[in-house]
Image (cartoon, helix red, strand yellow):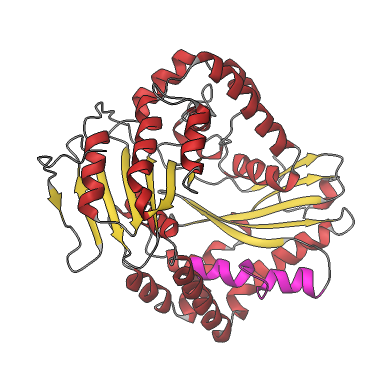
Amino acid sequence: MDLGADCKIPLRKVYPMSRIQKTELRSGISVITEEMPDVESSSIGVWVNTGSRNESSKLNGISHFIEHLLFKGTEKRTALDISREIESVGGVLNAFTSREYTCFYVKVLNKDLPLAIDLLSDIFINSRFDKKEMDKERLVVLQEIKMVEDTPDDLIHDLFAERFWKDHPLGASILGPSSNIKSISRAEILGYFKKHYNPSTVFITAAGGIRHRKVARLLEATFGSLKGATKREAEPAPSSSPGARLFKKDLEQVHICLGVPTPPQPHPDRYKVYLLNTILGGGMSSRLFQEIREKRGLAYSVYTYLSLCRDAGSLIAYAGTSKESSRDVIDLILSEFKKFPKTVAAAELKNAKEQLKGGMLLGLETSDNRMTKLARDEIFFGKVVPVKDIVKGIDGVKLSDIRGAASDLLAEENITLVAMGKVSAKTIPSWLKLN
């Protein structure tokens, strides 16, 4: 691709003395890059600030459907051409949809960056949304939905989100119901894409063995002329819905999710939440893993995880166990929640801090993870959060801080529980209201 010697990009270096730079294209799309001179790969992602929480109940699943359709052919490339071009250079071209955003990304060797940007821009700007291809891909998405429905340790997390964020789009499935996918029309796809995938919602991040100015020029030649803008109305923040719900299903195991609300991702208390999650169920040395699997052998898989959004968050414990042990496992999780504020020790906190910092720093050795960090910082904070600030935030959490946070968050009145399998009211404590 000809960069164009006369192409002048308004370059704004917003992070002096850093390898991270930011430019705004003429279309208004921001480009944020991090130069990693010693890395052989480059990763670039087109991020869209839209996901399943932005969908109506009638169109739930449309963002994920669009994600699939952008790989099914453009004005100059067939779906096979797209696959062959990226695989011919050993690269990766992929996408994912979340509750709050969608990403289309490429990872290639540095020398193949122009090809990567050409491919990425082509599928994003010039996709045909051909009706025949759409109808074939509709069948693929329906099979994906069935696959999740047949995988209980995946499905339970969707069922939990639906119950936890009751009556709010944040709890809707990312894939959507089969009935929606069957009925969504090409006109609805085109209208939704035009409204939600434009310069007002899009930004681009890149990291690796790149040069910011070159990336900006390549992107200006493709994304610089993109038009359209949508003023999105502010959404009300969701609130959690304590209580319990049981899904009776003939399964070999009972799958359990038990969670509580937390502060959102941008909240100053996020470091306390990170550490609380790590100590409770963030690895093989965690409390729940040791108590439920190692000491008692009641579960193969037991862990906690965080689902942190712009304006809300949750900490969820998951376990898969036998019907006979399901009540014991639930009681053990609740017991750890109850005693945690008084029993968490300084040594546990210290180890959790080192685990978090080590995992983060090791992860950031790759260009794709660096690219993703740039995007998440932009989505949740509107700026780059330096790694040293994250380390400082983790190190700054005191034992009294995490005890106070645990006391507030893990209280009984906050708890939501969802279980699936051969379950009944006897599976759960009587104080957890079934609704």
Q: Is residue 253 above or below residue 137?
A: below
Residue at image position (48%, 28%) is 66
From the viewer's perspective, is 176 left or right of 365?
A: right
Q: Residue furthest front?
A: 88
Q: Residue furthest bottom?
A: 347
Residue 156 figure quarter: top right
Q: Measured from the top left, where is residue 227 in percent x and y?
A: 24, 27
Quadrant of the snapshot with the N terminus: top left
Residue at image position (58%, 36%) is 173
Q: Does residue 283 appear left or right of residue 82 in this picture?
A: right
Give the total number of marks visible in the rendering: 0
- Say above or below: 120 vs 69: below
**Residue 149 image point, x, y percent:** 72, 36
Residue 33 part of the magenta-drawn span: no
> Can residue 278 be found in the magenta stretch?
yes
In this orientation, which residue lies closer to the viewer: 237 or 353?
353
Question: Please, is residue 36 above or below residue 97 in the view?
Answer: below
User: Who's the residue at 41% across and 79% down the image?
Assistant: 395
Q: Nearer the viewer, residue 24 or 224?
A: 224
Q: Quadrant of residue 161?
A: top right
**Residue 100, position as x, y percentages in the image:** 44, 42
Give the camera-side residue of 10 and 203.
Answer: 10
Q: Which stretch did the figure color magenta?
A: 274-295
Residue 101 visible, this orientation: no
The C terminus is located in which quarter?
top right
Vertical relation: 97 (above or below) 35: above
**Residue lying farthest to the right in this orientation:** 324
Q: Main secondary structure of the magenta part?
A: helix
Residue 326: give x, y in percent of width and height: 82, 56
Left or right of 239, for residue 49? left
Q: Is residue 170 visible?
A: yes
